[in-house]
Amino acid sequence: MILSTHFMVGAAVANYTDSLVWLALLPLGLHFLLDSLPHWEYADTMEELKQKIPQVVIDVSAGPLIIMAVSLLHGFDVYKTVWLLVGGTIGMLQDGLSLLHSVFPQKKLLKKFFDFHLSLHTKKKLGRKIGFGLQIVLDFLAVMFIGFYR
Ligand SMILES: [Zn+2]
């Protein structure tokens, strides 16, 4: 699943808790749940990912930019905005750790995490139109949930 969707879902979940424990656990769990659903990705391998650095930069930046925009539209609250950004970041953390594994493949803990992450990941892929569209819908729903709560 694309990083910005993981970020937005993590931020939306963070919006509904004041607990640091839930802030840490819910986005992590939802990341694995989302990865287990059939979806589309712009890169399936690390080699493909290296060819698509501009898309990765846009993908990584999109979530925080959307959260900043939503926060500004709803009266900027620094604490709440940082809370949402932390939730979103935790929601993307697993993919960051998988990226670290590709940089440090000899690190056993990263390898174990990578294998675990991969084992939960769906093997069924959706086409670009439907897969990307569903992730945009998820991003939109996340924005709606963040907006309604404020
Ligand atoms: Zn993942």
Image: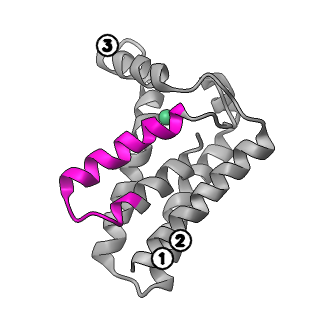
Residue at 48% across / 21% down in the picture? 118
Residue 21 coordinates in the image, percent (x, y): 19, 51
Assess whether mark 1 and mark 2 are in contact (beta carbons under 8 angstroms).
Answer: yes
Quarter holding the N terminus is top right
3D distance between C-alphas at marks 2 and 3: 40 Å
Residue at 45% across / 28% down in the picture? 98
**Does the magenta portion include 101?**
no
3D distance between C-alphas at marks 2 and 1: 5 Å
Q: Is residue 119 above or below residue 65?
A: above
Q: Nearer the viewer, residue 96 or 70?
A: 70
Prevalent SS, magenta region: helix
Assess whether mark 3 and mark 2 are in contact (beta carbons under 8 angstroms).
Answer: no
Between circles 3 and 1, the one closer to the viewer is: 1
Residue 2 coordinates in the image, percent (x, y): 59, 43
Q: Indicate the secondary structure of the residue bearing disc 1.
A: helix
Q: Is residue 108 above or below residue 64?
A: above
Badge 2 crowding class, 10 Å Cα cut-off, few under 14, some 14 to 19, many 20 or more, is few
Quarter holding the C terminus is bottom left
Mark 3 belongs to which amino acid?
Lys
Residue at 65% across / 37% down in the picture? 39
Rendered image quadrant of residue 20: bottom left
* Disc on res. 144: 2
Q: Indicate the secondary structure of the residue bearing disc 2.
A: helix
Mark 1 belongs to which amino acid?
Gly
From the image, tell me which residue sits under label 1. 147
> What residue range appears in magenta?
13-36
Q: Is residue 59 above or below residue 126?
A: below
Mark 2 belongs to which amino acid?
Met
